[in-house]
Amino acid sequence: MNRVFDSSGPEGKVRGTPQQIIDKYNQLARDAQLSNDRVATETFQQHAEHYMRMLSEATREMEVRREEQERQNRERQIERDREREERLARQEQQAASQPKPVEQTEVPADPAAAPQPDVIEASVESGLVETPETQPKPKPRQRRKPRPKPVEQTADQAPAAEATVPTSETPDASE
Protein backbone atom coordinates (compact mmCIF):
# COMPACT_ATOMS: atom_id res chain seq x y z
CA MET A 1 0.00 0.00 0.00
CA ASN A 2 2.86 2.38 0.77
CA ARG A 3 5.14 1.08 -1.93
CA VAL A 4 6.11 3.62 -4.59
CA PHE A 5 5.43 2.69 -8.22
CA ASP A 6 6.50 4.16 -11.54
CA SER A 7 3.67 4.01 -14.05
CA SER A 8 4.41 4.59 -17.72
CA GLY A 9 1.10 5.93 -18.96
CA PRO A 10 0.16 7.61 -22.24
CA GLU A 11 1.06 11.06 -20.87
CA GLY A 12 4.46 10.00 -19.45
CA LYS A 13 5.58 8.59 -16.14
CA VAL A 14 3.42 8.83 -13.04
CA ARG A 15 5.18 8.07 -9.76
CA GLY A 16 3.71 7.46 -6.32
CA THR A 17 1.80 5.07 -4.11
CA PRO A 18 -1.10 3.19 -5.74
CA GLN A 19 -3.62 5.64 -4.27
CA GLN A 20 -1.67 8.64 -5.59
CA ILE A 21 -1.41 7.06 -9.06
CA ILE A 22 -5.16 6.30 -9.08
CA ASP A 23 -5.93 9.91 -8.19
CA LYS A 24 -3.56 11.21 -10.90
CA TYR A 25 -5.08 8.97 -13.63
CA ASN A 26 -8.61 9.93 -12.58
CA GLN A 27 -7.66 13.61 -12.84
CA LEU A 28 -6.12 13.01 -16.30
CA ALA A 29 -9.30 11.14 -17.34
CA ARG A 30 -11.47 14.12 -16.27
CA ASP A 31 -9.19 16.52 -18.15
CA ALA A 32 -9.39 14.33 -21.27
CA GLN A 33 -13.18 14.13 -20.97
CA LEU A 34 -13.42 17.92 -20.73
CA SER A 35 -11.38 18.21 -23.92
CA ASN A 36 -13.72 15.65 -25.63
CA ASP A 37 -10.94 13.04 -26.08
CA ARG A 38 -12.87 9.79 -25.49
CA VAL A 39 -9.89 7.52 -26.30
CA ALA A 40 -7.58 9.25 -23.79
CA THR A 41 -10.37 9.25 -21.18
CA GLU A 42 -10.83 5.50 -21.56
CA THR A 43 -7.06 4.88 -21.45
CA PHE A 44 -6.62 6.87 -18.23
CA GLN A 45 -9.62 5.12 -16.67
CA GLN A 46 -8.12 1.71 -17.53
CA HIS A 47 -4.80 2.69 -15.96
CA ALA A 48 -6.64 3.91 -12.81
CA GLU A 49 -8.62 0.66 -12.67
CA HIS A 50 -5.40 -1.38 -12.92
CA TYR A 51 -3.94 0.37 -9.88
CA MET A 52 -7.26 0.09 -8.00
CA ARG A 53 -7.07 -3.69 -8.45
CA MET A 54 -3.46 -3.69 -7.24
CA LEU A 55 -4.47 -1.64 -4.21
CA SER A 56 -7.40 -3.91 -3.35
CA GLU A 57 -5.17 -7.01 -3.70
CA ALA A 58 -2.56 -5.48 -1.39
CA THR A 59 -5.29 -4.58 1.11
CA ARG A 60 -6.67 -8.11 1.01
CA GLU A 61 -3.18 -9.59 1.58
CA MET A 62 -2.60 -7.29 4.52
CA GLU A 63 -5.95 -8.32 6.01
CA VAL A 64 -5.05 -12.01 5.64
CA ARG A 65 -1.68 -11.40 7.34
CA ARG A 66 -3.33 -9.46 10.15
CA GLU A 67 -5.89 -12.23 10.74
CA GLU A 68 -3.10 -14.84 10.74
CA GLN A 69 -1.15 -12.84 13.32
CA GLU A 70 -4.25 -12.45 15.49
CA ARG A 71 -4.87 -16.21 15.30
CA GLN A 72 -1.27 -16.95 16.29
CA ASN A 73 -1.49 -14.46 19.17
CA ARG A 74 -4.70 -16.11 20.42
CA GLU A 75 -3.03 -19.55 20.26
CA ARG A 76 0.01 -18.26 22.19
CA GLN A 77 -2.25 -16.71 24.82
CA ILE A 78 -4.19 -19.98 25.21
CA GLU A 79 -0.88 -21.85 25.59
CA ARG A 80 0.34 -19.36 28.24
CA ASP A 81 -2.95 -19.65 30.14
CA ARG A 82 -2.75 -23.47 30.09
CA GLU A 83 0.86 -23.41 31.34
CA ARG A 84 -0.10 -20.98 34.11
CA GLU A 85 -2.96 -23.23 35.24
CA GLU A 86 -0.68 -26.28 35.25
CA ARG A 87 1.94 -24.42 37.30
CA LEU A 88 -0.69 -23.30 39.84
CA ALA A 89 -2.04 -26.86 40.09
CA ARG A 90 1.49 -28.19 40.74
CA GLN A 91 2.06 -25.55 43.42
CA GLU A 92 -1.23 -26.48 45.12
CA GLN A 93 -0.29 -30.17 45.05
CA GLN A 94 3.11 -29.42 46.56
CA ALA A 95 1.52 -27.30 49.28
CA ALA A 96 -1.02 -30.04 50.05
CA SER A 97 1.65 -32.78 50.19
CA GLN A 98 3.85 -30.91 52.67
CA PRO A 99 3.26 -31.83 56.34
CA LYS A 100 1.58 -29.17 58.40
CA PRO A 101 3.25 -28.02 61.63
CA VAL A 102 1.98 -29.75 64.75
CA GLU A 103 1.52 -26.59 66.78
CA GLN A 104 0.32 -23.44 65.16
CA THR A 105 0.26 -20.26 67.17
CA GLU A 106 -2.54 -17.88 66.56
CA VAL A 107 -1.55 -14.42 65.48
CA PRO A 108 -3.62 -11.83 67.29
CA ALA A 109 -5.41 -9.30 65.14
CA ASP A 110 -4.01 -6.41 67.16
CA PRO A 111 -0.16 -6.28 67.09
CA ALA A 112 -0.14 -4.46 70.44
CA ALA A 113 -1.79 -7.47 72.09
CA ALA A 114 0.98 -9.79 70.85
CA PRO A 115 3.82 -10.67 73.24
CA GLN A 116 6.49 -8.00 73.06
CA PRO A 117 10.26 -8.65 73.27
CA ASP A 118 12.25 -7.44 76.22
CA VAL A 119 14.12 -4.20 75.72
CA ILE A 120 17.83 -4.44 76.46
CA GLU A 121 19.61 -1.36 77.72
CA ALA A 122 22.54 -0.46 75.47
CA SER A 123 25.77 -0.01 77.36
CA VAL A 124 29.07 1.52 76.32
CA GLU A 125 30.56 -1.94 75.81
CA SER A 126 27.79 -3.19 73.52
CA GLY A 127 30.15 -3.72 70.61
CA LEU A 128 28.30 -1.28 68.40
CA VAL A 129 30.19 1.21 66.32
CA GLU A 130 29.52 4.87 66.94
CA THR A 131 28.25 6.77 63.95
CA PRO A 132 28.07 10.54 63.42
CA GLU A 133 24.31 10.38 63.93
CA THR A 134 24.69 9.00 67.48
CA GLN A 135 27.23 11.59 68.62
CA PRO A 136 25.94 14.77 70.29
CA LYS A 137 25.82 17.75 67.99
CA PRO A 138 28.33 20.52 68.73
CA LYS A 139 26.96 23.91 69.72
CA PRO A 140 27.19 26.49 66.96
CA ARG A 141 29.95 29.03 67.53
CA GLN A 142 28.96 32.63 67.83
CA ARG A 143 30.35 34.92 65.19
CA ARG A 144 32.69 37.65 66.27
CA LYS A 145 31.84 41.25 65.60
CA PRO A 146 34.18 42.84 63.07
CA ARG A 147 36.56 45.48 64.41
CA PRO A 148 36.09 49.02 63.17
CA LYS A 149 38.72 50.14 60.74
CA PRO A 150 41.11 52.78 62.15
CA VAL A 151 40.81 56.19 60.56
CA GLU A 152 44.05 57.48 59.14
CA GLN A 153 44.96 60.85 60.46
CA THR A 154 47.39 63.43 59.27
CA ALA A 155 49.68 65.33 61.68
CA ASP A 156 47.53 68.49 61.78
CA GLN A 157 44.26 66.53 62.31
CA ALA A 158 45.46 64.39 65.26
CA PRO A 159 44.48 66.69 68.18
CA ALA A 160 41.09 67.50 66.61
CA ALA A 161 40.26 63.84 66.03
CA GLU A 162 40.75 62.98 69.71
CA ALA A 163 38.32 65.63 70.72
CA THR A 164 35.60 64.34 68.36
CA VAL A 165 35.78 60.68 69.47
CA PRO A 166 32.71 59.86 71.54
CA THR A 167 33.30 58.86 75.13
CA SER A 168 31.66 55.46 74.72
CA GLU A 169 34.48 54.29 72.44
CA THR A 170 37.31 55.47 74.68
CA PRO A 171 38.69 52.81 76.98
CA ASP A 172 37.87 53.16 80.65
CA ALA A 173 40.55 52.88 83.26
CA SER A 174 38.56 50.24 85.08
CA GLU A 175 38.65 47.86 82.19
Image: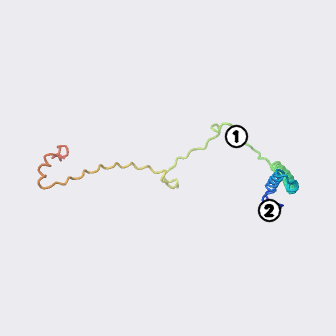
* Residue 86 seen in this snapshot: no
Give the percent coordinates (x, y) of residue 101: 77, 47
Which residue is farthest front? 36
Q: Assign the N terminus to one quadrant of the image.
A: bottom right
To which residue does mark 2 refer? 13
Task: Give the residue drawn at x 82%, y 61%.
Answer: 7
* Residue 150 seen in this snapshot: yes
Count up the numbered dots. 2
Is 170 placed above or below 113 here? Answer: below
Give the percent coordinates (x, y) of residue 25: 82, 55
To which residue does mark 1 refer? 107
Q: Nearer the viewer, residue 21 or 114?
A: 21
| Colour mode of the rendering | rainbow
The amino acid at mark 1 is: Val
Q: Are marks 2 and 1 in contact (CB under 8 Å)?
A: no
Label 1 sits on a secondary structure element that is loop
Mark with earlier residue (2, 1): 2
- Select label 2 or label 1 by which is in front: 2
Can you tell which mark lies on residue 79? none
Label 2 sits on a secondary structure element that is strand
Q: Which quadrant holds residue 116?
A: top right
Give the percent coordinates (x, y) of residue 109: 68, 37
Q: Is residue 109 left or right of residue 159?
A: right
Give the percent coordinates (x, y) of residue 3: 79, 59
Q: Nearer the viewer, residue 108 or 143?
A: 143
Task: Give the residue drawn at x 48%, y 53%.
Answer: 132
Q: Nearer the viewer, residue 155 or 45?
A: 45
The crowd level at tag 1 (other Cα within 10 Å; few <14, some 14-19, many 20+) is few
The amino acid at mark 2 is: Lys
